[in-house]
Image: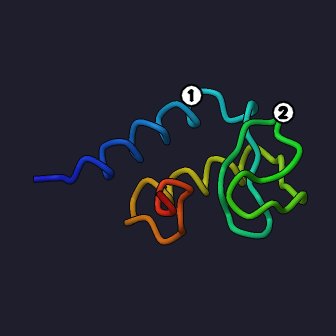
Amino acid sequence: MPEEGSSNRKDAAARILASPKNFKVCECCGSIVVNKAAVCPNCNAYRFDTRVAVVVKQAEILASRDPLSIDKMDYQ
């Protein structure tokens, strides 16, 4: 039985894959963020890769594995 987090990651990946041009990949931590973000909400970096192919590949990778990064919810 899949964990709830796994389902959420796949749902998020599906949204990203539906319109990858609206997202970018943080070059520091690999998070996918919306294009309007000035800094990454996870690591505060400001360098991003906006290429659609990179966004698609990263969404596929993140959807297929367990989360490895610390989320802001982990601090609560």
Residue highlighted by disc 2:
36
Query: Most extreme residue toward the front, as rendered?
Result: 76
Badge 2 element: loop
For this rendering, which residue is in front, 55 or 1? 1
Q: Between tags 2 and 1, which lies in front?
A: 2
Residue 15 lies left or right of residue 65; in this view the side is right
Q: Residue at x 40, y 36 (%)?
A: 11
Residue 55 lies left or right of residue 45; in this view the side is left
For this rendering, which residue is in front, 48 or 61? 48
Task: Report, in whole angstroms, how far the alpha carbon at label 2 lies from the one at label 1.
Answer: 17 Å
Residue 45 in picture, x, y percent from top left: 84, 62
For this rendering, which residue is in front, 9 or 56? 9
Badge 1 element: helix
Examine the image and state in which quarter residue 65 appears. bottom left
Residue 59 lies left or right of residue 6; in this view the side is right
Residue 46 in picture, x, y percent from top left: 90, 57
> The disc labelled 2 sits on which kind of residue?
Lys
**Mark 2 surroundings within 10 Å by alpha-carbon count, few (fewer than 14), some (14 through 19), many (20 or more):** few
Residue 3 in picture, x, y percent from top left: 21, 53
Residue 18: numbered disc: 1
Q: Where is 21 relative to 56, above or below?
A: above
Q: Residue at x 72, y 51 (%)?
A: 41
Examine the image and state in which quarter residue 43 appears. bottom right
Name the N-terminal-most of marks 2 and 1. 1
Residue 76: numbered disc: none
Q: Residue at x 25, y 47 (%)?
A: 4
> The disc labelled 1 sits on which kind of residue?
Ala
